[in-house]
């Protein structure tokens, strides 16, 4: 019987484990499906992390490294490469890994720190054909920052949250042409700092109250139709952008 099992070794899981240790709990286990701790922080190579916690600006991997160092000063156990398959009402955790195979762990307490998932193109109901070349911002971020692949040469971004804005800048720096950032709301969901540094500094247009109403392409994305969107009127067609996507290739340094 384990006192506390934490599912997920990202920022939330690391913080939960360290806090539990600081409050006197000594039998703690983190289960992480990836081969390293840090979670989403590992692909967020931009700075802006750590101001409140460490009093300085850090990149995502640097911030994760600081949290991992704090954890190493404790006796918290970590099992990497371990996928949790099920958690039963009586607090039994079914998980599997290459090293230990199939396990059933019993815990007194369980904290779920699995992070969040981005909504896919299907989840937000964008009509059109289903070619290759459509990525969530997080998936594109992982390909570019961790795997070394450029996901396209001509890019259209739907959504103006911070990750969308940051990826507009990142793709531009890697040599891609970002045609526009499109936002269905009448205001951006990102920080003003990111709007200035990621869009305005690179002359990337931001279309508020617009959304994608059609996607065309066979093998890969070829065209996307963007329209103005209001609550009281039907979408009015805006210019079509010919994306001319190319197969993934190695990103330049």
Image: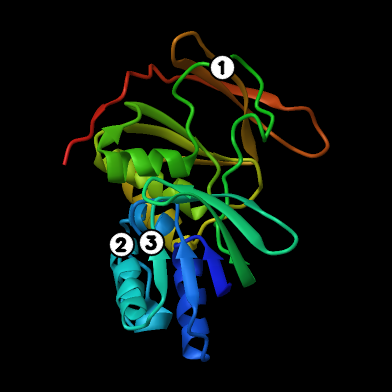
**Residue carrying label 3:** 38
Depth check: 102 or 233 in front?
Answer: 102
User: Among all residues in the image, which is located at the extreme right?
Assistant: 232
**Residue carrying label 1:** 130
Q: Quadrant of residue 127?
A: top right
Residue at image location 40% in from the left, 66% down from the top: 78
Depth check: 162 or 201 in front?
Answer: 162
Q: Quadrant of the N terminus?
A: bottom right
Q: Are marks 3 and 2 in contact (CB under 8 Å)?
A: yes
Q: Is residue 199 visible?
A: no
Q: Quadrant of the C terminus?
A: top left
Residue at image location 59% in from the left, 14% down from the top: 129
Residue at image location 80% in from the left, 39% down from the top: 231
Q: Position of residue 56 (x, y in %)?
A: 31, 79
Q: Is residue 5 visible?
A: yes
Depth check: 139 or 102 in front?
Answer: 102
Give the secondary structure at mark 1.
loop
Which numbered marker is on residue 61? Answer: 2
Q: Is residue 16 above or below residue 95?
A: below
How far, Cα to Cα, is label 1 from label 3?
Answer: 33 Å
Give the secondary structure at mark 2.
helix
Residue mark closest to the camera, 1 vs 3: 3
How far, Cα to Cα, is label 3 from label 2?
Answer: 7 Å
Q: Position of residue 99 (x, y in %)?
A: 36, 50
Q: Is residue 64 above or below residue 215?
A: below
């Amino acid at each position: 019987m384990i006192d506390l099992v934490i599912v997920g070794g990202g920022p939330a899981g690391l913080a939960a484990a360290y806090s539990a240790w600081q409050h006197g709990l000594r039998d703690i286990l983190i289960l992480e499906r990836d081969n390293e701790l840090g979670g989403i922080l590992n692909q967020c190579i931009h700075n802006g992390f750590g101001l409140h916690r460490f009093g300085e600006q850090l990149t995502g991997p640097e911030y994760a490294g600081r949290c991992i160092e704090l954890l190493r000063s404790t006796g918290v156990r970590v099992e990497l490469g371990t996928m949790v398959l099920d958690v039963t009402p009586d607090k039994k955790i079914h998980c599997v890994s290459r090293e230990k195979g199939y396990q059933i762990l019993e815990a007194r307490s369980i904290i779920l720190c699995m992070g969040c998932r981005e909504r896919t193109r299907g989840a937000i109901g964008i009509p059109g054909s289903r070619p290759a070349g459509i990525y969530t911002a997080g998936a594109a971020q992982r390909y570019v920052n961790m795997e070394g692949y450029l996901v396209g040469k001509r890019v259209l971004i739907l959504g103006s949250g911070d990750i969308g804005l940051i990826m507009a800048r990142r793709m531009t720096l890697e040599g891609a042409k970002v045609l526009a950032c499109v936002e269905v709301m009448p205001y951006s969901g990102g920080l003003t700092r990111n709007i200035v540094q990621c869009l305005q500094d690179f002359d990337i247009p931001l279309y508020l109250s617009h959304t994608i109403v059609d996607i065309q392409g066979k093998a890969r994305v070829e065209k996307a139709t963007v329209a103005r969107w209001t609550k009281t009127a039907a979408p009015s067609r805006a210019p079509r952008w010919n994306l001319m996507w190319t197969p993934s290739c190695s990103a330049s340094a």
